[in-house]
Amino acid sequence: MRADRLVRRMRWTLSIALLVTARAASGQASEGLDSATAAAIAPIVQQARAANLPVTLLYAKAREGQVQRVPVAKIEAVVRTLADRMRTANEALKPGASEQELHAAADAIKSGVGPETLRAMREAGGDGSLAVPIGVLTQLIARGVPVERASMEVVALLKKGAVAKNFIALEESVRQDVLAGRRPDESLDLRLKGIIPNLPQSANADAAGLNAGSPRRPR
Amino acid sequence: MHDINEEGDELIGRIVRELKTLPPVPADATARVLARVDAARHDEGPGRFSRRVIVSLPAAIGYAVAATLAGFLIRGAVPRQPSAPVVAQSPNAAVSQTLGTRTTLVPAAANTRALQEAPIKWQFVLDAPRAKSVTVVGDFNAWDGSKTPLERDSASGVWSALVDVHPGRHVYAFLVDGKTWTLDPNAPRTKDLDYGTQQSVLMAGMP
């Protein structure tokens, strides 16, 4: 009988230990969120995880709201919207997108960029990361360049072989022009004239024979 | 089906028949087993389930403390997921991070992208001589202020920190004294369409 009691006590101890461990693990999974926010977004996170989307972006978005003391209901709505954008971005950036690309693409969609633009960017950009080109596209739109115009020009740049440093240079030039009082779309026109001729796939480079035997995109 | 008996191997046939035969059981065996079961039931009594549940208060507290300690020991032994995305320190680390996140990524593409997405050092600076503490929160540190405190230069009162950021567009803000949302005076600003707040913007290039 004493052995029976010992076994029962061991069972109780083990059960409580498992409960405590599970509780600790779930606390860890909430990624530093308060319990109400963590509970509110848990189903969204679960669905995203099942869809193989990086849930760290969802937790970060929730924490962004928490640090600004946004109500839980609003955080939940924002995280749900982000998950939808990530699904759209993931589908558009097939066959696979990095976390940085998904992050950038979700922001771009928020700014009004359509999935067809993202698909065109993936097609034009080959295996290269689209995190910077998509980020520059978002920032051009934020500066006031119309979505369609900015999307068209960024895809065209990728087709001509533009790489991250070209996009960063373009964005910086437009920023300085806008600060100096130039209209964003005017500035984009002007600065593209300075970038395009130097790209590997541009007509001028072709005419000069610079592209003979060169790959479509620098690796 | 292969039948041993049909082959006429008498020896093997006898062995099989022997093995198929159950060992002899004493006539009173069943009665003895039932008597033991009945005796055990009688010993525990009708309220045995209740007796299992009820334990004395000091013992319960003792078990709870022991279980909690055991739980934390187990938790400590299990590898934890970092509370924010791990910032890759090298291209190889970036490869594994990317592959770990996106299982559909083609390895060659993953290599190319991971190299292009390797983090670079970005310096954040805020002139706030009267502040007691300054942290930077942004999408690069998952909006976790505790991760990135700025250090104050005692002579100038300028706060700064070097942070790993991946190439691309990032939004951020400073938290002064743990609560005051402060924009970077030297960076472009944008209105976040999700939460409606103003944020600073940085465009990080390739490493």
Image: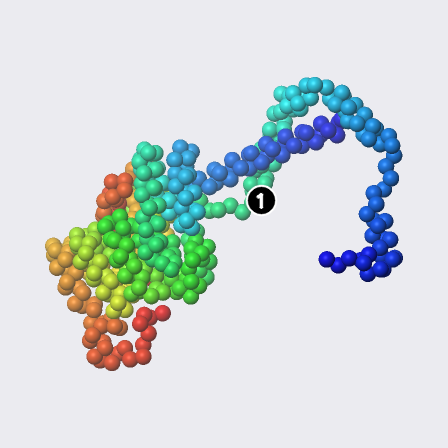
Query: Which residue lies under the disc numbered 1?
Result: B77
* Closer to us: B122 or A172: A172
**With A170 as the anchor, is A105 left or right in this view?**
right
Tell me the quadrant of the picture where the C terminus of chain B can be found: bottom left
Residue found 63% across the figure and 32% down from its top: A13
The percent coordinates of residue A85 (x first, y second) are 31, 48
The percent coordinates of residue A17 (x first, y second) are 59, 34
**With B205 as the anchor, is A16 left or right in this view?**
right
Give the residue type that dot 1 points to.
Ala
* Closer to us: B155 or B192: B192
* Closer to us: B9 or B134: B9
The percent coordinates of residue A61 (x first, y second) are 35, 43
**With A87 as the anchor, is B42 left or right in this view?**
right
Residue found 76% across the figure and 20% down from its top: B42
Q: How many marks?
A: 1
Residue found 29% across the figure and 65% down from its top: A124
| Most distant residue in the top direction | B46
Q: Is residue A79 above or below residue A140?
A: above
The percent coordinates of residue A37 (x first, y second) are 38, 35
Can the viewer see residue B157 in this picture?
no
| Most distant residue in the front direction | B6
Label 1 environment density (alpha carbons within 10 Å; few <14, some 14–19, many ≥20): few
Tell me the quadrant of the picture where the N terminus of chain B can be found: bottom right
Q: Secondary structure at mark 1?
A: helix
Q: Quarter-wise, where is residue A92 in the image? A: bottom left
**With B118 as the anchor, is A116 left or right in this view?**
left
Residue found 67% across the figure and 29% down from its top: A9
Q: Quarter-wise, where is residue B51 in the image? A: top right
Q: Is residue A197 above or below residue B4?
A: below
